[in-house]
Structures are given as structure tokens and as C-alpha cells.
Amino acid sequence: MTQTPTHPQAHAQITIPAKHPMVTILGSSDSLLRVIEKAFPSADIHVRGNVISAVGDATEVALIQRLFDEMMLVLRTGQSMTEDAVERSIAMLRANGSANGNGAHGDGHRETPAEVLTQNILSSRGRTIRPKTLNQKRYVDAIDKHTIVFGIGPAGTGKTYLAMAKAVQALQSKQVTRIILTRPAVEAGERLGFLPGTLYEKIDPYLRPLYDALHDMLDPDSIPRLMAAGTIEVAPLAYMRGRAHPTFTNVLTPDGWRPIGDLQVGDLVMGSNGEPTPVLGVYPQGEKDIYRVSAQDGSWTLCCGEHLWTVRTRDDKRRDKPWRVLETQEMIGNLRAAHARRYELPMLTAPVSFPEREVPMDPYALGLLLGDGCLTGSTTPSFATEDAELAQALEAALPGVSVRHKGGPDYVLNRVKSPGDVVTLENPVTGMLRELDLVGTRSHSKFVPNDYLYNTAEVRLAVLQGLLDSDGGPVTQNDRTCRIQYSTASIVLRDDVIALVQSLGGVAHTRRRPAEGRKQGSALAAHRYDSHVVDIRLPEGIEPFRLTRKRDTYHAAGGGGRPMRFIDSIEPAGREEAVCIQVAAEDSLYVTQDYLLTHNTLNDAFIILDEAQNTSAEQMKMFLTRLGFDSKIVITGDITQVDLPGGTKSGLRQVQDILDGVEDVHFSRLTSQDVVRHKLVGRIVDAYEQYDSRQDQNGRGGRNGK
């Protein structure tokens, strides 16, 4: 009786085209053929001329036939096959079941060895970087498709190296403007404290693997230049988090200024477009070295050395390059170019949009009275002007009030009497001024009430127009745009005018003219106090004057030009408790003190966090929420090699439970089969996994037996 074979036998013939010499298929001294024979010991493989025949189990023969097809596809691209590539091709074919139609990837497509081995990521100095295993290809594809990718697997699987190649590729193709490479920080004062040298010299060996990968992928001579320009940043993770302000630094909110240390997630701050944007994260930073960053218009704010600034140089503007992002410390000592200020700061793209507030007096009328009105309260309110047009405008803006010409420049603001009125009725202007707490103020103590300073753009502009029509004016210069000048004896009113200008997207420079030695005019009181002169430039489209003669002069001279701000100085300012915030604005910018625009998230960047298993849960959250727009994050680590103090949970382990299933976040898991170092590394990884598994089983058994 004949026994039916358990596995059907099959025969296949593979004819190698003449254009492929057999040595490219079989290897030198048949080295590749021996790898194939060892992988398929149950099959008989014979070579005659350019024909390869295989006899054996149908499944195995199908795999052999497919293997030679894939090898020829690789050879057609001009690449050579190595023993390692053949072994990996066999592993891929077995893993995805290509021979029998199983193992399709998520989109139904089955990756082939040829697709994996011919996917070039980056070519540099005569060598090409590409994935070598199926999981590596899927990892690289995931980086293309997702914003945040976790590469988790044992050492030697190419997690960081492939991510670095994708980062350099993105930089060279202008998908991003900078690369940031980071690792969880080793405490320099404890673990590295015994090493000689500066802090950077202490941490440099710890970051050496990242530098080495860069040197494989870029011209070594270009790397220092790219790092000096901020295009490539290599730093410990702790340096990434320290982009902060002192806790008392003011940040603009819809209700006015608030200390940044008082903000909470969900609070609103003002963005560069003048609109409110929510705070997404608040991160206390502890005590940090603080610097005072000042602009040429006198505006300034405090921040740490790692705080981020959006800036551009004159060359950037001339060459139509995008704005760049630099740290405070990167700009120190580099603020001038041929005696000109190097770094221009962005301005508001639109006036700040505060919510509307009810006010008792027309804002333009308030501006006129703050400029040329008498508000002492001891007499009937009055107004002084040589322009009858202003007196008429004031009367039109104050219902129930007549502006009566008294003689010369003087006008009196009388209540319009109705039949039956009693003499003791309060003057409406005095009543409004009393409500605004302005009664009794004099030239040196006037101010703009907060309900006007933090009102709609229309209200703020009307107040400013009243102030400029009364106490300001255009200053024309030959061959230059027209600037606006305003003067007041009140320090508070000076600052309020500057705030109005800045909130509308303009700039204001101030200087003081001492009263001593100035020639006295008819109004002696005006010269008892120093005069504060404010030079103003407003954005195009914002009209500074209503008074006809001033408006005509301003426009005849070409308007005010473009408001600009440049960093003038960066100076140490001690140590302070600091905090950083993340906002939801598309450009990540928010308004800080003096209406300066700054941010602390990373836009247009490719960010790699290596050795992420050694992050704490708090560090991982901080890092992920630092993501800016048009950026990509790749996080790599091996959860079997956690080196954290006892009791500290690995952020990489925890984040898998938190972000699993979140859209645009992908977890790529590599195994010992993806190790691309010495073959022994993969075997070591497997041996440790088996050992750990046995220990876990023994531990459970012991516990159950107790």
C-alpha cells in the first residue's frame, strides 16, 4: 500500500536573464547560494548554466522562487546582494507569508523584500541609507505619514539612525527649517560632576552617538556651521524644557496683563494676530539664569537663555527667507552686523482684539481733553486749541454740552440747560470725568483709564487720535517717511500712549526734555515739569489723525512707513523662578511685556528624542506638548533598558497606554529580527528575553505557591 506524502512536492525552475551574471545571484564562491540552501534544508537546489531548479515542499519551493525574483528586482536597481540582505529577504518572505497571500499590511499591500531593500532615504558621501528589514520599512513609512512616531525596540535595530536619516532628508528637502536632537538629561551635577570641563564638555560624550550619526549623513565641515546657525541643535532633554519667563513676567490676556506664573491651562492669552488663544500647557521650570532682552524702541522683557525668539536678518528679508527661531543665548554677542542691529522681531499682524467695554465718554473726546483740556474740577471744564475744527468735533462728541468760545484759544464746556433745570446740576463733563477718576488731574498726572486702554481697537484708536490731534503732530523729513510726534508732561500718560500705539501694531520711542533751561511760554505751568516726547510709527491703514491739516500733512509725506523692532541688547538679569507656557496659536507666538512677541514651542522642526525609556512621565508629557506647527517628532527607546532611579516610572512605558489609538500618533515596534548590527546582538537580545520570561514565570509560580 502506497503512503500519500504529508506535504506535496513541487518543482520550480528559475531562469536568470543573461544581463545578470550568475555571480551576482549566487555570490562570490557561491556564498549567497549557501545562505539559501541553509535556510531551506529540505529543498534540493541545483544550478546549471543560468537555470536554477528547486525541488521540495511546495511552500518552500514557492518561497525560493519568490526569493530569486526579489533578488533580481534588487539587482535591476544597480544594488548588489549581500549575505545579510539575502537572510533578511528570506525572513521577510517568511514573516509576511508572501508565497501564500497572507501577511498583508494595514492598507492591504504586502511589502516585498525588493521594496524594502531599494527604499533609499538618504545618500551621503558614496553610501546610501535605507531600511534593511520589513519592520524598519514600516517604521520609516510611519515617519512619513504621522506627526508623532514612537520607535520601540532593542538596541541595534536602527531606531535612532533611521530617524536621523529622515530628519536630514526633511531638512535638505526644506520640509523643516531645523533639526533638534535630544536625550533625557543626565544630572550633570551628580553623575557627571566628577568630569573636568564646562557643562557642555561634560555632556558632550553622552550625546556622542547623535553626533556620530550626523557625521555619517552630512559633510562634517558643514555641521559646526549648521549648529552655530541653530539649524541643528543637539542638547539634553532638560535643556529643551527651559524656555521660560520669570513667574512675574506680564503676558497679555483679554482682560489686560497677568503674571505668567498665574496662568493655568485653558486661560486665554493674546496671539500675534491680536486674537485670544488658549494656553495648552504650563510648566514650572524652577530657578534659572535670566536675561533682559531689549529692543531699540525701549521695549523689553525677561526670559531664560534657552527661550525662543522668532527673528530674521536683513539678508533673510532680502533673500525672501522665512523667519528663523533662535534661543536667547544663541544671539548673545551677535546682535550687530556692520554696526546695524542684526535681528528683527515680528510685529502684531493686526491690532489686539480686546472685548468691548462700556465707557461714559466718547473716546475721541476723552483724547482731546487729556491733551488740551483743563480737568482740575475747581472750575468749569475747559479746552484750549487754535483749531476751531477740534472745538466743533468735541462738541459733536459730547451730547448735552456746548463748547463756547471764550476768546483766543480758550473754550468753556457748558452744560446745555433745559427749562426747569436747577443751578446745582453737575456739568455732564465733570460727571464723566469723576466716573473715570480724572477730576483733579493736571498736565503731569493725566492718564488713560483702563476701560479705554483695554477696549476695542476702534475705541483705542479714537483715544489716540484725540491725543495726537491735540498734543501731537506729523514730523516731515526730506526723502523719508513721516513720523508722528507726541509730547506730554505726564509720565503715566506717556506710557499709556505707548501702550495704545503698541496695541495697534505700532512702535514708539520716547525721550525726555528737561524743564530746566527751557524758555518759558505763556502757559508757565507747562514747563514746571519735564516733557516726554514720543516718536510714533503706526502700521499702514491705521489713521493717526482726524484733524484735517495734520492728516493732510501726514499723507502728503507718504505716511508713517513700516513699524519695525530690532533686538538691541541682551544682558544678564540674575536668577529667578521661571515658568513656560504653550499656546494654541498657529505660529505659537504670544504677547508678552511691552507687546513683544515671543514663543517657546518648536515650529518647522524635526525633533528626535533618543533613549526615551529614561524619561519620567512628567518629562515625556512636557516634551510631547512642546510640539509646534509643521513639526515632526520621533521618539525612540528600549523599554527593557530603563535606567531611572527606583520608583520612577518610565514615561515611554506609560505613554503607550495613554496615546495608543490617538490619531496621528503611531507606535512602531521592532524586535530582535530587526537588529542590523552583528548577528550576535540579535541572539543576545533573544536570550535575555527568554531569561526574563522564565524569571517572570518562576516569580508567578512562587507567589502562587505561597
Image: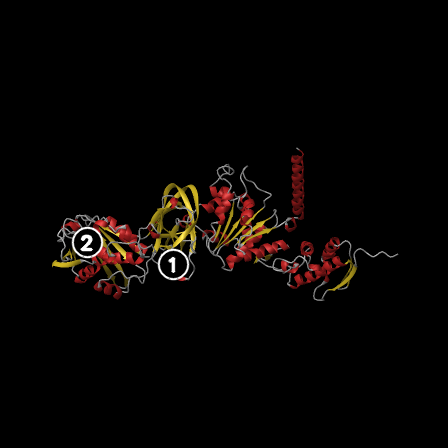
- Give the total number of marks visible in the rendering: 2
In the image, is residue 594 above or below residue 647? below
- 10 Å crowding of disc 1: few (<14), some (14-19), many (20+): some
Check disc 2 and report the residue beneath it. Answer: 429
Choose between 28 and 531: the one closer to the eye: 531
Check disc 1 and report the residue beneath it. Answer: 314
Choose between 11 and 83: the one closer to the eye: 11
Secondary structure of the residue carrying numbered label 1 = helix
Which quadrant is home to the N terminus?
bottom right
Residue 584, horizontal then vertical, whole percent = 43, 53
Mark toward the viewer: 2 or 1: 2
Left of 663 or right of it: where is 526? Answer: left
Q: Earlier in the sequence, mark 2 or mark 1?
A: 1
Residue 183, horizontal then vertical, whole percent = 52, 46
Q: Residue at x 59, y 59 (%)?
A: 120
Quadrant in which residue 318 is drawn: bottom left
Left of 381 or right of it: where is 322? Answer: right
Kind of residue sitting beneath label 2: Val
Residue 603, horizontal then vertical, whole percent = 46, 54
Q: How are the colours assigned in the image? A: secondary structure
Left of 117 or right of it: where is 348? Answer: left
